[in-house]
Amino acid sequence: MKAFTTEHLRNLAVIGHGDAGKTQLTASLAFVAGATPRWGKVDEGTSPTDYDEDSIARKVTLNNNFAHLEYQDAKINLIDTPGYAAFVAHARPALRVADCALVVVDAVHGIEVQTEKTWQYANEFLLPRFMVVNKIDKEHADFGHALETATSSFARSIVPFTLPIGKEGSFRGVVDVVHQKAYEFDENGKAKAIPIPSEGKDIFDRTRERLIEIVAESDDALMEKYFNDGTLPEEDIYPNLAKAIANSKLCPVYAVSSATLVGLQILLDHIVEFAPNPATHEAEYGFKDNSLAGDRIPRKYSNDEPFSAYVYRTIADPFAGRINVMKIVSGKIASDATVTNCTRDTQERLGALHVINGKSLEKVNEAQTGDIIAVVKLKETQTGDTLCDKSSPIVYPPVEYPEAAIAFAIEPKSRADEDKISVALHKILEEDPSLHFDRDPQTKEFILSGSGQLHIETVVDKLMNRYHVEVALHPPKVPYKETITAMAEVQGRHKKQSGGRGQFGDCKVVFEPLDRGQGFEWVDKIFGGSIPQNFRPAVEKGILEAAQTGYLAGYPMVDFRVTLVDGSYHTVDSDEHSFKAAGRKAFRNAMEKVKPALLEPIMDVEVFVPQEVSGDIMGDLNSRRGRVSGMDMRGKQQVIKAKVPLSEMLDYQSKLNSVTQARGSYHMQFSHYDPLPHNLAQKVIDEAVAAGRVRAHEEDE
Ligand SMILES: Nc1nc2c(ncn2[C@@H]2O[C@H](COP(=O)(O)OP(=O)(O)OP(=O)(O)O)[C@@H](O)[C@H]2O)c(=O)[nH]1
Ligand SMILES: [Mg+2]
């Protein structure tokens, strides 16, 4: 394949709500452009971007994936992204490297929750936007309604560039409002010009008028021309529409069906004509080194600048090994070049360069500014890294992923599985920075945390299908904490006399409760030398060490102050070790008097549901000990805001699915800790004892 120059590149991230048809649109565009000889179908597991077995089995996109096509004299790079809440975070890195977002809207449902969320992501990166109203062939599809929900949700001019001819089963063509032409499409999606139908002529005229106004408003001279002549010449309209799109003033909308290929060829024509190329960006901003401190350095999207690239995706391919996908921000690159990974301060030899289509790689000799390429088997490079020319270092800030919302314990089914699990998970984590993996220091359990239950389940599937590791998934863990509710003065005395040198440490401390969120405070109030200065930190260390595993159920103890008031020591036998032991003992003695209690995390929850079920949803939230704090309408959907204990939300998605027939969604984030009600606390304590998390309060050494 040849190298494309920057102005002939179009990088689009395909974003939107789950099931809107992003993956099918990508497959259908590739087919219409002739990039794939066979027409890939999501429902048959043959789309280029939902290629891994987990996506195919679930018919859901799980991470961002790539397809490219050559059309006319351009190369169109499409990054298909997930729309389901559990995976939607992967749309952000795609938007980071795209030059335009292709927002896919379901013609039956209009704007939905994840359409809004991904639109917000695109705002973060100041991206121009195209919008596609997909599935116009479907029963109850309504282009006008979908458009209305878009214009009422988003603050920029959203104007159709094509209008549908026919709807539902009879959707057969589109009118190109910009070029004033109409088309029908054959079964391969090839457009054939037809006369503009008289039906709907008024909508066509109004839409065209609106476009001309937008162009006129963009420039005083044009405005004057428009005022005098009542219209504008075609040669003024096209380039200025492209400019309005690139400046995020205008979002063109296209009527299409990815299932019947109607409208797609015109969409491709318009992507080439109107979508911004990478150099339309003013510049990309980075920092001089990986501290990401100091002034921001601009880097122009130009072949004349030194090479730099941002790695936005890592794929752990079972055959090819690690594949890094990157966007070239500046300069050119040829195969076998050696570059610097400025994020990690190492050198990397690139080897062969590839363009990527789903899972298949095709070699290219060189690539230019703005292109997206893949390289294999780099030593250390990971998602989020910057590669650059040694002589002109720059580090682009990496895309951040949201914190994990839920954690599960996973247990290898056999010894062999236990041996393989870390290696396999390491590879899965490379591909998915929104996933976290830890080992509980006490229970030695493997803890996997991510954005939701579905997320974790897909990881378990992948462990099994791809790495042949079998694990059992245990119920999610709630990160409880412990605190104290009363004040007490206690003594901690450690004394041992067993031949040779003895051990001696003795402290008197006061424990007091602090407000929520205050953590731990240490106050030294010893007057004089009852404990020498150099041993006092050991008392604090001993107390903190003991607090780490709490008292009631093995959870960390928080929000308390300890004041050291007195003690004694022995000139020969006292040492740090003895005072640490005295601190631990003081902690344990205190626990009998300070009335320890359990705390539970409370989440801020937002639930999005059709209005007719909002009563049921609120009743259900109440029964989960939730407190509803507000209600709101967003488009046609009701937003219910509530504070709910995390422990009550663990099975929420399935409840929501059953009440709303899978049209509801929710997200939550940590708010604060509250005391756990007594009856529930007892249950947590019993479970902790049964699981061996609470150590018998053995006598100290
Ligand atoms: N009738 C009709 N069905 C479509 C159209 N486009 C996609 N579909 C179907 O809609 C379903 C979802 O399509 P996908 O392409 O997987 O949707 P998606 O937006 O990629 O979904 P996620 O990746 O999970 O966010 C599949 O069953 C498709 O066959 C269309 O234009 N018309
Ligand atoms: Mg998809």
Image: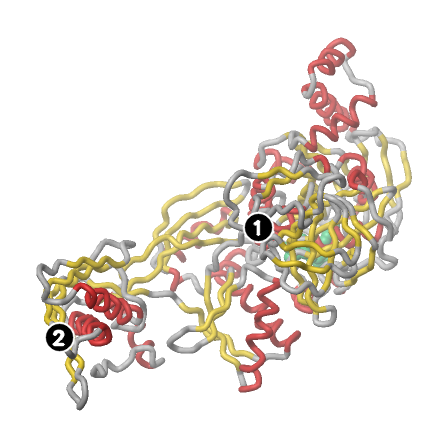
Kind of residue indicated by mark 1: Pro
Q: Dot 1 corresponds to which residue?
A: 398
For the residue pair 348 and 196, the one nearer the viewer reads as 348
Percent coordinates x, y for residue 490 in the rendering: 12, 69
Percent coordinates x, y for residue 123 in the rendering: 58, 39
Q: Is residue 68 left or right of 321 when viewed as pictured?
A: right
User: Where is residue 255, by image quadrant?
Assistant: top right
Which circle's residue, 2 or 1, is located before the other in the chain? 1
Image depth: mark 2 or mark 1 in front: 2
Q: Residue at x 68, y 36 (%)?
A: 281
Q: Residue at x 39, y 78 (%)?
A: 443
Q: Is residue 14 left or right of 528 when viewed as pictured?
A: right
In space, the residues marked 2 and 1 are separated at their CA atoms by: 56 Å
For the residue pair 666 and 576, the one nearer the viewer reads as 576
Q: Quadrant of the C terminus?
A: bottom left
Q: Is residue 63 left or right of 39 when viewed as pictured?
A: left
Kind of residue indicated by mark 2: Thr
Q: Residue at x 85, y 45 (%)?
A: 71
Which disc, if any, is residue 571? 2
User: Where is residue 319, by image quadrant?
Assistant: bottom right
